[in-house]
């Protein structure tokens, strides 16, 4: 309970145990001391620049301290080899012996696109398109359609209707060698 006759006291400033309160005079004295130390070190190397030998000694001491300190195994933030972080899936010459490894990718969704054809037109013509406009494509009638998986040509086929829905009957599967040849422009 607060006594009304007591005079209000200034709240005490909290300081860490064993530390003195820092005053503006202390701050100014520290700044002057630092400036004096910098002036002495500038005078030692003669040019007012950085003393290379002292800097090298500081780096050597810091590196020695780091090497002598906690080992990398003790720190949870230390870099670890990839072998410790990721499972080994085998080398390039190792055969897949277990089908469960192959099953991991079976549920990854891919986007399949059937392309009728392509064309280029100026923006002026594009803005003039209206309901009922016809765009001429480079594909010919009866020509096989391109089947792309995630944007990569993998097959060609012809359009069919199944249960009142469009589908495509694959007529030619593109081999990896053919894909490489097309990528190289050959």
Image: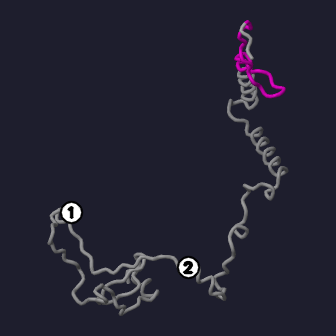
Q: Residues within 10 Å of mark 2 (few under 14, many from 20)?
A: few
Identity of the residue drawn at 27% across and 76% down: 118
Residue 141: x and y, percent?
21, 87
Residues 184 and 127: in front is 127
Where residue 20 sits, quadrant-wise, is top right
Which residue is painted at 35% across and 88% down in the image? 156
Image quarter where the C terminus lies is: bottom left
Position of residue 109 in the picture relative to residue 77 (left or right): left
As displayed, is residue 96 above or below residue 152?
Answer: below
Mark 2 and 1 residues: CB-CB less than 8 Å, in contact? no
Task: Find disc 2 in the rendering and name its residue.
Answer: 105
Stretch of the chain drawn in magenta: 5-29
Q: Is residue 16 magenta?
A: yes
The picture places residue 165, in percent across and down from the top left corner, at 30, 84
Residue that carries the numbered disc 1 in the rendered image: 123
Depth check: give the residue in front, 99 or 72.
Answer: 99
N-terminal-most mark, 2 or 1: 2
**Residue closest to the far top:** 5
Residue at position x 71%, y 9% from top?
4
Secondary structure mostly seen in the magenta stretch: loop
Residue 58 in the magenta stretch? The answer is: no
What label sits on residue 39 in the rendered view?
none
Q: Secondary structure at mark 1?
A: helix
């Amino acid at each position: 309970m607060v006594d009304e006759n007591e005079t209000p006291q200034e709240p005490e400033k909290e300081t860490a145990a064993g530390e003195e309160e820092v005053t503006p005079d202390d701050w100014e004295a520290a700044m002057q001391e630092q400036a004096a130390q910098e002036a002495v070190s500038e005078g030692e190397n003669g040019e007012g620049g950085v003393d290379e030998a002292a800097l090298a000694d500081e780096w050597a001491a810091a590196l020695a301290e780091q090497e002598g300190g906690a080992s990398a195994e003790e720190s949870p933030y230390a870099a670890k080899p990839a072998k410790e972080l990721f499972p080994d899936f085998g080398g390039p010459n190792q055969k897949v012996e277990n089908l469960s490894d192959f099953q991991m990718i079976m549920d990854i969704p891919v986007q399949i696109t059937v392309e009728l054809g392509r064309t280029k037109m100026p923006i002026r013509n594009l803005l003039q398109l209206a309901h009922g406009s016809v765009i001429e494509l480079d594909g010919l009638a009866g020509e096989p359609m391109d089947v792309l998986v995630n944007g990569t040509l993998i097959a060609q086929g012809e359009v069919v209707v199944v249960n009142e829905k469009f589908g495509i009957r694959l007529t030619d599967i593109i081999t990896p060698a053919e894909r490489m040849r097309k990528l190289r422009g050959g």
